[in-house]
Amino acid sequence: MKQKDPFQFTAVTIAFPMLLVLIIWVVYWLELRFSINLSSYGVRPRTLSGLSGIIFSPFLHSSLSHLYHNTIPLFLLSLGLFYFYRPIAIKVLVLGILISGLLTWLIGRPANHIGASGLIYVLVSFIFFKGVRTKYYRLIALSLVVVFIYGSMIWYIFPVKENMSWEGHLAGLITGVIFAFFINAKLFIPEKYHWEGDNYNETEDPFLQHFDENGNFVPTSEMENAHDEGNTSIRYNYQFIKSKKESSDEE
């Protein structure tokens, strides 16, 4: 029986990424609408009050440009996450926010770290390394697409730009790699054909028996004729006939 395709586009696939991006935009709109500044709720490394930023910082952005450049890749990557890794997508997102935020709090320089870029690095590194580890062609293809589009982001885990949280990027990258190796789920069951089994014997394969030693195809009718000829036996019937002399002596 043909197995059900594990990768199916449903309402859930797009609903969660849209909801995540919508929350980020709504928070930014509330800041503009009520003239408030929530940036102080970002991650402030190694301070007790800065711990709250582990949860809040991915939803805070300093400008419209900052918001725009983060939410587009976040939507696309989370969409790929929910389509290809749906059973573990929520876990990756929630733990990604918490662990990457905690790492930023531990290794970050004294500053206010805000933005969803850390989560973006979690998704990029997770999707790439997880796809490579699965050795499944569709997930490997996804990994190659991700590294082709976002591969240049690797440079931003270093302090190459002022006022950029490279520590958050590095924390996200490390978190994604860890997830790729330690978050396991039965994502799919590739269909196995009988010749892929460990007990497969090609000499017993009905299809391969249609080919002779030279690789020529032998139709079923010829195989049956050859089989019948190979099993042909000759039966000899003997009948004892008395000679005339023996018959006369008996009389």
Image (spheres, rainbow, N blue to C red):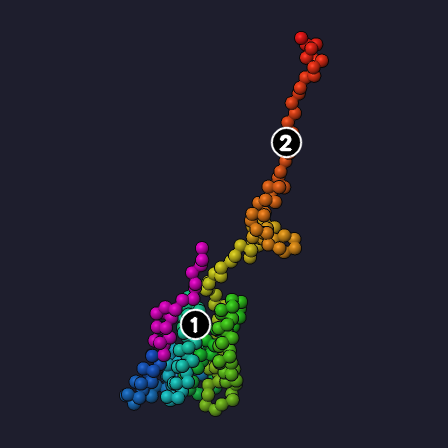
Kindly identify the residue that appears in the image at 63 percent across and 35 percent down: 233
Viewer-closest of 29 and 245: 245
Give the amino acid at mark 1. Answer: Leu
Q: Is residue 25 above or below residue 137?
A: below
Of all residues, the one furthest to the left in this rendering is 34
Q: Is residue 206 above or below residue 134?
A: above
The percent coordinates of residue 1 (x first, y second) are 45, 55
Viewer-closest of 138 and 98: 138
Find the distance from the CA under tag 1 to the CA under tag 2.
Answer: 74 Å
Q: Which residue is mark 1?
A: 81
Question: Quick one: quadrant of the C terminus?
Answer: top right
**In terms of sequence position, does the residue under pointer 1 or pointer 2 come before the other?**
1
Q: Secondary structure at mark 1?
A: helix
Residue 135 visible in the displayed image: yes
The percent coordinates of residue 160 (x first, y second) are 51, 89
Q: Which residue is mark 2?
A: 235
Give the class, few, some or many, for how many residues have Cα within 10 Å of label 2's Cα (few <14, many ≥20). few
Kindly identify the residue that appears in the image at 59 percent across and 41 percent down: 228
Q: Secondary structure at mark 2?
A: loop
Give the amino acid at mark 2. Answer: Arg
Q: Image quarter for residue 47?
A: bottom left
Q: Is residue 9 above or below residue 168?
A: above
Region of the chain picked out in magenta, as a range: 1-21
With 136 as the anchor, is 216 left or right in this view? Answer: right
Is residue 140 found inside the magenta-colored segment of the image? no
Give the class, few, some or many, for how many residues have Cα within 10 Å of label 1's Cα (few <14, many ≥20). many
Viewer-closest of 162 and 54: 162
The percent coordinates of residue 23 (x first, y second) are 33, 79
Kindly identify the residue that appears in the image at 31 percent across and 85 percent down: 29
